[in-house]
Image: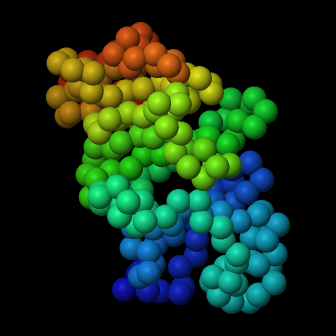
Amino acid sequence: GILESREKIPHVRLIGDLVYNFWQDAANPRGLWRRCTYESYTQASSSSSDEAGARQKLEWETVLDLDALGRAEGESWVYKGADVLDDGSPGCADRVLLSLSRGGADAVVVREFDLGLKAFVPEASGGFVLPEAKTRASWKNKDTLLVGTDMGPGSQTDSGYPRAVYEWRRGAKLSAAPKVFEGEAGDVSVS
């Protein structure tokens, strides 16, 4: 099947000066979020006529192993994406919001992740953590998120997605976050 194919070309994303890729194969069915230097990535692709083979030989550094995380937490986590902090401040590209779903559901848990430490930022240490819901979250700056999530009755559209966007500041309770935009119940979603 596709997980065993060596012909896959990694979809990559540049974050800071590193190339990131989410990779699944037979040994890592839930996947590895990994990275390498931009230089090594471009050299590997230009040094071989067998592009897929050259990229397989890259020295990838594992940032997060979803299979290991799932075993450690007793969950069937599925990677749903990463929103990178990019507010222009020094070192800003070292934090992301990782969206993980249980078993591939639409609802996700959003957790702040430190790329330098390759670890989640604990909620007790001020890390952003959003409970499971059909959530959309993005950075406004390093201490503020714009969040659309289930905030209780009337906060979701008829489709079950966020109806409003809230500005959530680090250290504050999500329930106290001020609403900055609200759509109609008949909208599919707002973000």
At x 36%, y 42%, the residue is 109
Task: Find residue 111 and report its horizontal and vertical position in percent.
Answer: 45, 40
State whether residue 99 is above or below residue 51: above
Q: Is residue 8 left or right of residue 176?
A: right
State whether residue 43 is above or below residue 53: above
Q: How is the image coloured?
A: rainbow
Q: Is residue 119 left or right of residue 27?
A: right
At x 77%, y 53%, the residue is 17
For the N terminus, which image quadrant? bottom left
Task: Find residue 103 and report its horizontal and vertical position in percent.
Answer: 27, 58
Q: Nearer the viewer, residue 127 or 20?
A: 127
Q: Is residue 22 left or right of residue 164?
A: right
How many marks can you see?
Answer: 0
Can residue 138 be seen here? The reply is: no
Can residue 87 be seen here? The reply is: yes
State whether residue 191 is above or below residue 182: below
Q: Nearer the viewer, residue 113 or 150?
A: 113
Task: Find residue 83 and report its horizontal and vertical position in percent.
Answer: 54, 42
Q: Quadrant of residue 157?
A: top left
Task: Find residue 62 and report its horizontal and vertical position in percent.
Answer: 60, 66
For the C terminus, which image quadrant? top left
At x 17%, y 18%, the residue is 153
Q: Is residue 19 left or right of residue 148?
A: right
State whether residue 189 is above or below residue 59: above
Q: Quadrant of residue 63?
A: bottom right
Q: Nearer the viewer, residue 29 or 52?
A: 29
